[in-house]
Image (cartoon, rainbow, N blue to C red):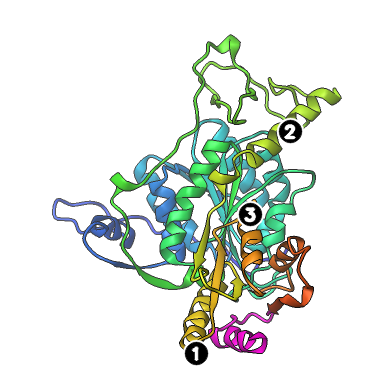
C-alpha cells in the first residue's frame, strides 16, 4: 500500500526549571481548562479525551488527517507513565493495542482510510477475543489513497461490516470539537465496559477545524474501567456468562490462567469445534450489544417537535443541516434534524418514530448512499418518494444552502 505520509520524529521536551512555563500547548490547555474557553482542534480534543479517559498505551502509524492525535500522545503519554509506540504499519498497530489491553492497559490507535482498511482483521480479532480497545478513524476521501486532506463519510458501512464474519460493532460519530473530546471518553468507557473494539469516526474537516471549547472539570468526567475478577484463579472463566453479557477481565501477569485465540473458543478461551460452544460464543458477542441498546445508542433530536420535514445526518454534515434548518424556519418551513451520535448499533427506534411523525426525510451525506439505506430499511410503510438523498463525493462539503434548496424542492 502506497502512503504519502512519512513518520515524524517527536520533538524532545524541554528540561523543566523552577520557573518553567508549560512546555507544550496541551499542558497549557489542561492548566487553563477550568477557567476559560480554549481554542482547540478536533484531533487535539481526541487526544485530550483519551488522556482524561485513562488511555496509557498508543500504537499507531502516521497518516493524514489523524497524525496530530499521535503527535500529541507521543509527547504526553510518557510524562504520565504511559507508552507510545510508532509501529511499522497499521496491521502492527491494531495488534499492539490489543496485546497491550490484554496486559491491562487502556489502549487506543488513530488512523484514516487506507490504514483503517488494513486494521479490519485485527479489529475482528479484538472482537472475538473480547479485548477492550479504541480505533479512531478520521475519515478522508477515498478509495485507496484518494484525497488525504479532503472530507468524506465513506467509511460508515466499513466501520460495521469491514471485518469478516458476524461481529457486532459499536461506532460513535461526533459533530463538534467538544463532542470529539466527549465521545473519545465515551468510546474508551464503552470498550472497557463491553470488552470490545469501539470505533470513533471523525470527518477530516472536524479533525482539523478549531473551536472554542470549555473542558469539564475532571471531577465531572465519568471514567469507566473494566470489571476485574473477584473469584480465585482456578474458578476464573475468561468468557463467563451473566445476564447482561458483561464479564470480568483478568490481565496477563495477575495470576489468572486463560487462553486467547482468534479461533472459535469455549468459556476458558480454548479452541472448539463443538457447535453448541460455537453458538454460545456467537450469541454472547451479539447479545452484549443487542441487550444493551439503551445504554449504547445516543441521538440528538433538534427541532423535531413540530417538524413536517426531517433531516437525518451525522458528523460534519449535521452541522450544515442545523444551519439550513434555521434558515428554513425563518421562512416558515417546519424542519427538524435527527442526528445519531451512535451510528452502530443503528438507532432503529428513534428513526421509526421520526418516520411516523414526518412527511419527508432528507438524508445528506458525503458518500454515494450509506446512511440512506439504513433509513430505507425502516420505511416499509412509506413511499420511497418521501425519502430524499443528497450525496456528494468530490471532496467538498455539503453546505447549508445545498440542504435548504433540497428542503424547498420538497416543501
Q: How far apart in space, not on screen, are marks 3 and 1 (Cα)? A: 31 Å
**Relative to 152, is 35 above or below?**
above
Q: Is residue 37 or residue 109 the one in the foreground?
A: 37
**Relative to 62, is 145 above or below?**
below
Numbered disc in front, either 2 or 3: 3
Q: Which mark is residue 88?
A: none
Q: Earlier in the sequence, mark 2 or mark 3?
A: 2
Task: Name the residue at 85% across, 25% down.
Answer: 275
Tag 1 secondary structure: loop
Q: Is residue 36 or residue 65 the one in the foreground?
A: 36
Q: How far apart in space, not on screen, are marks 1 and 2 (Cα)? A: 51 Å
Toward which corner of the image does residue 144 lie, by quadrant?
Answer: bottom right
Is label 1 in contact with label 2 (beta carbons under 8 Å)? no
Toward which corner of the image does residue 172 lie, by quadrant?
Answer: bottom right
Circle 2 is placed at which residue position? 283
Measured from the top left, where is residue 13 in percent x and y? 33, 55
Please state if 49 lies on the left or on the right of 165 as rendered.
left
Tag 2 secondary structure: helix
Please state if 376 lies on the left or on the right of 247 as rendered.
right
Bin the neighbour count of mark 1 within 10 Å (Cα to Cα): few under 14, some 14-19, many 20 and up: few
Bin the neighbour count of mark 3 within 10 Å (Cα to Cα): few under 14, some 14-19, many 20 and up: few
- Quarter of the picture containing the N terminus is bottom right
Measured from the top left, where is residue 347 in percent x and y? 62, 55
Q: Earlier in the sequence, mark 1 or mark 2?
A: 2
Circle 3 is placed at which residue position? 349
Can residue 394 be found in the magenta stretch? Answer: yes
Q: Is residue 382 or residue 146 the one in the foreground?
A: 382
Circle 1 is placed at which residue position? 331
Q: Which residues are magenta?
A: 391-411
Amino acid at each position: 500500500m502506497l502512503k504519502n505520509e512519512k513518520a515524524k520524529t517527536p520533538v524532545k521536551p524541554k528540561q523543566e526549571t523552577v520557573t518553567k512555563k508549560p512546555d507544550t500547548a496541551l499542558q497549557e490547555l489542561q492548566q487553563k481548562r477550568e477557567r476559560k474557553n480554549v481554542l482547540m482542534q478536533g484531533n487535539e480534543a481526541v487526544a485530550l479525551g483519551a488522556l482524561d479517559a485513562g488511555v496509557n498505551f498508543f500504537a499507531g502509524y502516521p497518516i493524514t488527517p489523524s497524525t496530530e492525535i499521535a503527535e500529541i500522545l507521543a509527547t504526553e503519554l510518557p510524562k504520565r507513565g504511559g507508552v507510545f509506540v510508532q509501529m511499522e504499519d497499521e496491521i502492527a498497530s491494531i495488534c499492539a493495542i490489543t496485546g497491550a489491553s490484554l496486559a491491562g492497559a487502556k489502549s487506543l490507535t488513530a488512523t484514516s482510510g487506507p490504514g483503517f482498511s488494513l486494521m479490519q482483521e485485527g479489529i475482528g480479532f479484538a472482537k472475538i477475543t473480547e479485548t477492550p480497545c479504541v480505533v479512531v478513524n478520521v475519515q478522508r476521501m477515498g478509495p485507496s489513497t484518494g484525497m488525504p486532506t479532503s472530507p468524506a463519510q465513506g467509511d460508515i458501512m466499513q466501520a460495521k461490516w469491514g471485518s469478516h464474519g458476524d461481529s457486532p460493532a459499536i461506532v460513535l460519530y461526533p459533530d463538534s470539537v467538544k463532542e470529539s473530546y466527549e465521545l473519545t471518553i465515551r468510546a474508551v468507557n464503552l470498550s472497557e465496559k463491553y470488552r470490545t473494539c469501539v470505533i470513533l469516526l471523525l470527518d477530516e474537516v472536524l479533525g482539523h477545524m478549531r473551536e472554542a471549547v470549555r473542558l469539564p472539570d475532571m471531577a465531572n468526567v465519568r471514567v469507566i474501567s473494566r470489571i476485574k475478577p473477584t473469584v480465585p484463579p482456578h474458578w476464573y472463566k475468561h468468557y463467563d456468562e451473566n445476564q447482561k453479557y458483561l464479564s470480568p477481565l483478568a490481565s496477563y501477569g495477575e495470576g489468572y490462567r486463560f487462553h486467547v485465540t482468534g479461533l472459535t473458543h469455549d468459556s476458558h478461551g480454548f479452541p472448539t469445534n463443538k457447535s453448541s460452544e460455537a453458538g454460545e460464543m456467537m450469541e454472547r458477542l451479539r447479545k452484549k450489544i443487542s441487550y444493551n441498546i439503551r445504554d449504547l445508542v445516543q441521538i440528538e433530536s433538534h427541532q423535531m417537535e413540530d417538524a413536517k420535514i426531517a433531516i437525518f445526518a451525522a458528523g460534519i454534515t449535521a452541522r450544515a443541516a442545523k444551519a439550513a434548518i434555521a434558515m428554513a424556519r425563518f421562512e416558515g418551513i417546519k424542519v427538524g434534524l435527527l442526528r445519531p451520535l451512535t451510528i452502530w448499533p443503528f438507532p432503529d427506534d428513534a428513526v421509526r418514530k421520526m418516520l411516523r411523525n414526518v412527511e419527508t426525510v432528507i438524508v445528506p451525506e458525503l458518500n454515494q448512499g450509506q446512511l440512506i439505506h439504513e433509513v430505507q430499511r425502516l420505511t416499509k410503510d412509506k413511499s420511497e418518494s418521501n425519502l430524499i438523498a443528497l450525496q456528494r463525493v468530490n471532496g467538498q462539503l455539503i453546505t447549508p444552502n445545498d440542504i435548504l434548496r433540497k428542503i424547498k424542492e420538497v416543501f
